Image (tube, rainbow, N blue to C red):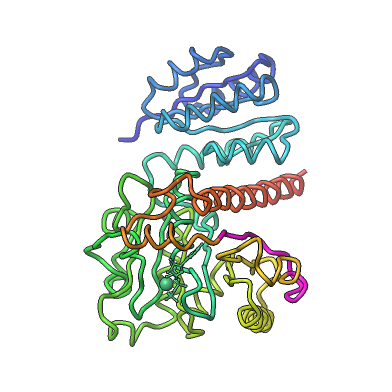
Amino acid sequence: MNETVATLVLSDDSQAAGIINMYLRDVGTFDSKGTVSDFSQAFDIVSSCEKIILIVDIDDRTEQKIDFVTKITADVPTCKVLIVSETPSVELMVKLMRAGVREFVSYPIIKTEFFEVMNKLSSSFGCVEKDASRCRIITVFSNKGGIGKTSIATNLALEIAKTTKENVALVDLNFQLGDVTTFLDIKPSFNISYMLENLEKINGDFLLSTMEKYRDTSLYVLADPPFFKMADDVSTKQIEKLLAILSGTFAFIIIDASSAFDDKTVTALEKSDLILLTAVANLPAMRNCQRCLELFAKLGFPKEKVQILINRYMENDEVKSEDVEKVLDKKIYWQIPNNYFTMMSAINKGIPVVELNPSSNVAKSYRDFSLFLTDNIFRADFESKLRENRKDY
Ligand SMILES: Nc1ncnc2c1ncn2[C@@H]1O[C@H](COP(=O)(O)OP(=O)(O)OP(=O)(O)O)[C@@H](O)[C@H]1O
Ligand SMILES: [Mg+2]
């Protein structure tokens, strides 16, 4: 039997808090623990409940409350947080989303909307299945080999898992000898072929128990098949289904794509929310990038879906960032500095550079990139939610 979900309002505004508690008592499906304004009291109540939704009015003592929410989301996994605010700013929400908050409602509270969110939060306790539309699929792509796709996919996936604490799937779509397992020094017992052959049996619990978890992080790896021949009869439908299933469990899917424009890669690119078109700053690479951009335009991909990622960037590169932007008629999304020695030593040891040498310039760039990328996603999520809410008035 599921226990009742408790609720606690953390607020300095007793009137508004009173209304929220009145709503909760009227509905009767939640066990309302009332209102507190004191952080340590809130912490004691929250950590003593099996399942609790902490409703935080963020309008007063905002910075302190952000710190408190960050502590709660890190220390009390049995607590979900709902933010209420008069005028939540995008910057504020991005900070809260970074801390693990995914839901908010704004004043004046509309009862139906409030309970929709409350019910969503309460049914998410202990449930590995997620709202698939919330999952972001990010593909690292280049139509040239050896540009750094696997280095980027691996380090970025690990950083996103660490910064968001969400479950992240790293998928090696290189059916012909992928490198992810070598880069992470893992020997998974299951690979993508097994998943593709057993799509009907797979659910969230199965995925989380069979996919290789990287150390004590929330990064799960779906490795390439051990033999070439296994790739032969993989259909695009199977890739689509696999991604759909993963989307129901993971908050992010990072794909290390093959450089070939084969049907499996194109399916992954189509299904992606973001394509990191990776290049180095030299003329042949720019020409290749241009061709890819033209092809993506023909495939009808929205411009913002494809972003330029420059790898092995050097201050004294002959082709400057401005030249790249001019040639491609597109802003560079991110640049990762050149550091061959550090990258190579990480690959040889099978330890991602963000773990092996966190103070190196490449590791720092990956950390900043992960924050930049996830903040952009959180910002877009929040803005679209705001637009939806306004439509309801
Ligand atoms: N920021 C960097 N600075 C210097 N060298 C790098 C950097 N990133 C990657 N490399 C090097 O580039 C080489 C290729 O990297 P990687 O295997 O990640 O590329 P790839 O695009 O996945 O290659 P493939 O097409 O073979 O799958 C490696 O030797 C790696 O050490
Ligand atoms: Mg590779």
In which quadrant will I find the C terminus? top right
Q: Residue furthest left?
A: 189
Q: Which residues are magenta?
A: 325-337
Question: Does 84 sit above or below residue 364?
Answer: above
Residue in the picture at 36% in, 62% down? 347
In which quadrant will I find the N terminus? top left
Residue 331: where, in percent of width, then height?
73, 65
Does the magenta portion include 355?
Answer: no
Residue in the picture at 49% in, 13% down? 40
Residue 45: where, in percent of width, then height?
44, 17
Question: Does 391 sit above or below residue 315?
Answer: above
Q: Residue furthest front?
A: 316
Quadrant hosting residue 321:
bottom right
Front residue of this view, candidates 55 and 383: 383
Residue 200: where, in percent of width, then height?
31, 69
Q: How many callouts does the rendering have?
A: 0
